[in-house]
Amino acid sequence: MSAMRIVVKVGSNVLTRPDGMPNVTNMSALVDQIAALHSAGHEIVLVSSGAVACGRGAIVPQRQLDAVASRQLYSSIGQIRLINLYNQLFGAYGIAVGQVLTQKENFSSRTAYLNQRACMLTMLENKVIPIVNENDTVSLTELMFTDNDELSGLIATMAGADMLVILSNVDGIYTGAPSDPESRLIEKVRPGEDPGEFVVASKSGFGRGGMGTKCGIARKVADEGVAVVIARGDRPNVLVDIIRNPGSVPHTLFEPSTEPLSNIKRWIAHSDSFAKGVIRVNAEAASILRSDRAVSLLPVGVTAIEGEWEEGDIVNVYDPEGRRIAAGRSAMSSRDAAVALGKHGHRPLIHYDFLYLE
Ligand code: GLU
C-alpha cells in the first residue's frame, strides 16, 4: 500500500483515566501503533487532547477558580506531562516528536495559515511527528476551537492529509444511542449523506466534543477530499488495522468526495467561525452565486457590509433571507467595499478562485 499522510486525533477520554492521571496503557498502545505506521513510511500528525485532564489530576488549586483560570492552570501543567510521556514513548522507537500548540487566530489570516502549514510540512519532511493541541493557556474562550475534533479537521485539511482518524470511546456513529442494543453501527457514509440525524446528544467524561460535533466535522472534512474514520481508541491495534485491514475492526468511514476543493477553498470552507466580516447580497447576486457558473462576487450585487476587515481577510456572504451562501477572501478592505457597494464598474469583491460556495 502506498504511503499515506494520516492525522490521528485522540481524545481526553482515551488518554486519561477517570482519576485524571494519564492512561499510560492506552498511550503506549497508541504510540506502538503510530511507530509501526511511521516505520512503514506513513506520515503521521497526532492531534492529542488531554492537557486539561492531565493537569486536573496533578494539582488542587489554592482557591476556587473560574472556568478560564482553571483551564489555563491545568493545561499549563498537563501539557508538559503529556508531551513528556509522548517524548519518552516515541523516544524508545528512536522517533522524534515536536510540539505544536496553536490557536484559532492562526487559521484566520492566510499568512498565519501558510506559516503554520509550512512548519508542519517541514516537520513531516524531517520524519518528525507533530503533536498538536490547542494552546489552552492563552486561548480566549470566545475564540477557542469548539473542541479538538474541530482542530483535527482543520489540521487534516491544512496538511493535505489522505485520512483523518478520530479515536473516541465508541466504535463510530450508531443509528441510535450506542448503549441501546437496537442501535446499529453505520459503517460507511457516502459523499452527500449526513448521518447527523442519528446522533444522540450525549457527551461523556473529560473531552469537550461529542458525537454530534465529530459527525459534522467528519462530513465537512470528507467533502474536502479527506477520508475520515471514527473508531474506538482503546481497541487493541485499532489504528494499524484501520490502515491495513479495515474489515477487521468496527468503525465508521466517511468516504472522501471525489471532487475535492483546492487548498485555498478548503481553508475558506472552514472559515465560518473566524471570518472578519459579513457581506449581504441582493436576490439576483445570490441566485447567480448559487448557479453552476464560475462567477466572482461583484460590488453591484452587495447591499450591505458589516464589520471591519483588510484586503485578503475572510468574509462570509449572506443572502437576503440571512442564510450564509458563501465565504471568500475579500479583494478589498471593508472601507473600499463600502465605497464600491451597489455600484457598477468595480473589480470583483471576491474573485471566483477565492470564493467558497455552500
Ligand atoms: N485542548 C484540550 C486539552 O488538551 C481538549 C479539548 C477537547 O476536549 O477537545 O485538554
Image (tube, grey):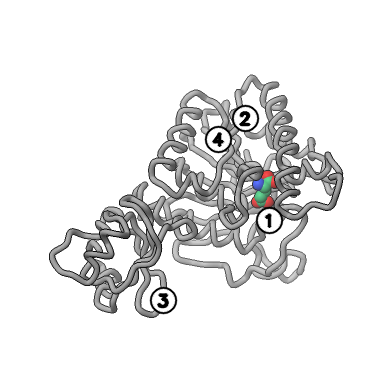
- Residue 280 vs 171, above or below: the answer is below
What's under tag 1, amino acid-wise? Arg
Residue at horizontal 62%, vertical 64%?
212
**Taking the image as drawn, is residue 260 in sight?**
no
Query: Which residue has dot 2 on it?
Result: 36
C-alpha distance separating marks 4 and 3: 40 Å
Residue at horizontal 34%, vertical 52%?
310
Query: Which residue has dot 4 on it?
Result: 44
Label whose residue precedes the other's in the sequence (4 or 3): 4
Give the number of the mark in front: 2 or 1.
1
Label whose residue precedes the other's in the sequence (2 or 4): 2
C-alpha distance separating marks 1 and 3: 29 Å
Residue at horizontal 52%, vertical 67%?
194
C-alpha distance separating marks 2 and 1: 29 Å
Q: Tag 3's secondary structure?
A: loop
- Expressed as whole percent of the image width and height from the top left, the position of residue 299 reads 23, 66
Q: Tag 1's secondary structure?
A: loop
